[in-house]
Amino acid sequence: MNLALREAFLTFKRAPLLSVLSVTTIAFSLFVIGLFGLVAVNLQQALNQLAERVEIVAYVLPGTPVETSTLAIKDIEAFPEVQRATYVSEDDALARARSELTEFRDVLRELERNPLPASIEVKLKPAFRDADNVNAVADRLRGFGFVDDVRYGRDWVEKLDRLRQIAAAVGLAVGGAFAVVAIIIIGTTIRMAVLQRSREIAIMRLVGATDWFIRLPFLLQGAIKGLLGGAIAVALSYGAYLLVTKFLLQGAFFTLQEGAAIVAFGTLIGLLGSASSVGRHLRRV
């Protein structure tokens, strides 16, 4: 293993220009993936903020005792999808309307009787804020005898689901396309290195070297190039993030785990590109 690692680093010394060029090319390929990744991260954050507003409101029939609603809240909070349930009395609903609907404040102040019903506001856990789970919880709430109506903005929740699906599909397609490009680039650079040493490889074959012994230095070389390219891509992405944050808008950057995943992804595609190129050459020798 030490010999293979030394051979991998010697390749950088033998062809420094080619090595720098290949690492730079890999870095920019992964940088493009990183930029799309940043867009995806911020889009996902925006969608999560919208999902925070997903709420189910169960309106209570007039005359329902508060105790009935209080007991029902305990049952509702036992639902696996529910984060919390809050009782809003008629008076609380009117006070909220007066504070939020300022344009109707005078009209609301002159009302002789409160027209707003009491309600139970149900907030779902983050993992359950999709259309299917919201519909399921709303149907269960309708099963309570004292519930007059249930509202949750069905169309809005379904549109939010579609946005999530579109964002995931676009991110996967773009990321996959640039990953293929990066693998081709790495494979090409490794193949050039293999061709440079084709005579040496043929001699090693003649003296009995195994395919694995020949292949390992090139695999390590590809992995190192991919790792360096991934690290540079994360650094470039951070620079782009700082510029955007300074001059355009506030956003989020990758977490430590996401940054490490990009570097690991670069290492992986470096291995794949090397394995493909070296394997093709060894079959011809």
Image (cartoon, helix red, strand yellow):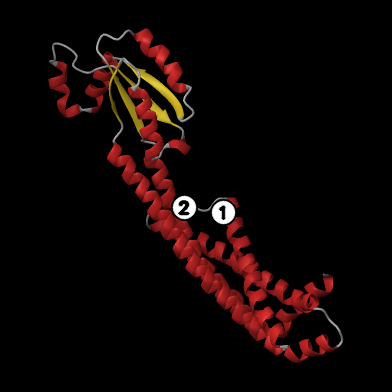
Residue 250 visible in image: no
State the residue at coordinates (81%, 90%). Answer: 203
Tell me the residue that label 1 is attached to. Answer: 258
| Picture disc at residue 100 | none
Q: Amino acid at mark 1?
A: Glu
Q: Position of residue 78 (x, y in %)?
A: 48, 22
Q: Amino acid at mark 2?
A: Val
Tell me the residue that label 2 is attached to. Answer: 41
Q: CA distance from mark 1 to mark 2?
A: 10 Å
First in residue order: circle 1 vs circle 2: 2
* SS at circle 2: helix
Q: Is residue 280 left or right of residue 262?
A: right
**Quick one: quadrant of the C terminus?**
bottom right
Task: Establish if 249 lies above or below 277.
Answer: above
Direction right: furthest residue: 207
Task: Establish if 248 lies above or below 113.
Answer: below
The reply to whether the C-beta atoms of the residues labelled 1 and 2 are less than 8 Å apart is yes
| Towards the viewer: 213 or 107 | 213
Q: Is residue 217 left or right of residue 260?
A: right
Task: Establish if 78 lies above or below 7.
Answer: above
* SS at circle 1: helix
